[in-house]
Amino acid sequence: MRARSAILAVLGCAAIMLGACTSGSDPSAGSTTTGRRLTTEESEALAISRFANYDAGLRQVDATIPDGTHTWRLRGWFDYRDRRGYATLWADGSEMAAALLMWSDQYLFSSQSGDVAAGDLPPLPVPETDEATAAWVPTDYAPEKHVPHAALQIIASLGADRPENPLLLQQSDARWLRTEEIDGVDLRVVSGPRPAQSADRARPGERADDAANDATVRYWIDRDGAMYRVEMRLGNAWGSVDLSAPGTTKVMIPDLTR
């Protein structure tokens, strides 16, 4: 019972309100936020980026989630075809993991991490799924209250079974920000459209840098639309997730809702 209470604290009670996040971090710290409208080529790459994750299926995900004065780390996999993930969660600076997670955009389950060290990928095969009700604890999503919940749902949303409309993206408030290099690959850093305007034009008289500064998600994508990194605004701070090849094909993530 004590271990289960600790897991629930990690995923809920210890998390702060998104709207009251006062970590003191500058949302644009370390990032150039001036931008311009997307070119046709750039909008086409952004339009296919979520479909590229779906097409790849399994991606390794390594996330940093700021939560007030704390920072959570997450390492594992997300299958964008089956729409569910499996990962190790730990507090930054800890030696041992806090919990194992399985999640989608609709559900979240946690389990005791046992002897899994902080920074390790979760064990395979997924432990004790034949006794799911005892080993895996369901948690109701509350992204408006709990920062980790919001981050998990954003990670789950990075795949789609069809490309978006590049023309609508080009007409929206999505912005090209700059170019960066990750692992020797030249990438475009693009701010995604704000949710309320995702398929609309920017407001009349709005400057490009206004839209870039108000963005909630930024994408690092290559010319073919492959997604390497995503930054997500979480309250007054930015979290991030790096996406990479999984290193193994032997990851079977069960659906605990069945």
Image (cartoon, rainbow, N blue to C red):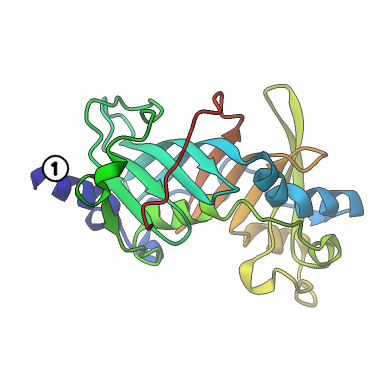
11 on left or right of 26: left
Name the residue nearer the viewer: 175 or 11: 11
SS category of the residue bearing label 1: helix
Check disc 1 and report the residue beneath it: 3
64 on left or right of 230: left
Q: Residue lying at the far bottom in this picture: please name it.
A: 204
Residue ID at (36%, 52%): 256
**Is residue 190 in sight in this rendering?**
no
Question: Looking at the picture, does residue 205 appear above or below residue 9?
Answer: below
Residue 129 in which image quadrant? top left
The quarter of the rendered structure image containing the C terminus is bottom left
Name the residue nearer the viewer: 101 or 11: 101
Q: Position of residue 219 (x, y in %)?
A: 67, 47
Q: Amino acid at mark 1?
A: Ala
Q: Position of residue 106 (x, y in %)?
A: 44, 62
Q: Residue lying at the far left in this picture: please name it.
A: 1
Name the residue nearer the viewer: 253 or 51: 253
Residue 29 in which image quadrant? top right
Q: Position of residue 1 (x, y in %)?
A: 8, 48
Name the residue nearer the viewer: 160 or 17: 160
Residue ID at (67%, 23%): 183
117 on left or right of 18: left
